[in-house]
Image (cartoon, rainbow, N blue to C red):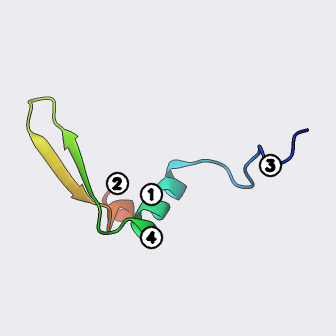
Amino acid sequence: MLQGLMMNTPLRIEGLLEHAEKWHADTEIVSRLPEGGLHYLHCLGINTAI
C-alpha cells in the first residue's frame, strides 16, 4: 500500500464544521436561496447552527 494516501480519521461533515469554526471563525459563508436572495452565515457557531 502507498504510504501517505490514507487519512487516519474518517472524513465526516462534523470534522469539516469543527475545522471551519476553529480556523475560519471570522469568515462569512454566502449562499444563494432558490428564490434568488442571499443567505449569510458566519463560521463561528456553525457547528451548533446545523
The residue under label 2 is: 50
Q: Is residue 15 above or below residue 34?
A: below
Distance between the Cα atoms at labels 3 and 1? 24 Å
Mark toward the start of the polypeptide (2 vs 4): 4
Circles 4 and 1: CB atoms closer than 8 Å: no
Query: In the rendered structure, which amino acid carries the disc numbered 4?
Result: Lys
Mark closest to the chain's N terminus, 3 or 1:
3
Secondary structure found at label 4: helix
| Quadrant of residue 36 within the rendered picture | top left
Distance between mark 3 and mark 4 Cα atoms: 25 Å
Label 4: which residue? 22
Q: Are marks 3 and 4 in contact (CB under 8 Å)?
A: no
The residue wearing badge 1 is 17
Q: Residue at x 16, y 47 (%)?
A: 39
- Between residues 13 and 30, which one lies in front from this camera angle? 30
Amino acid under disc 2: Ile
Does residue 12 appear left or right of residue 30 in this picture?
A: right
Q: Amino acid at mark 1?
A: Leu
- Residue under label 3, please give it: 4
Q: Position of residue 42 (x, y in %)?
A: 26, 61
Tag 3 secondary structure: loop
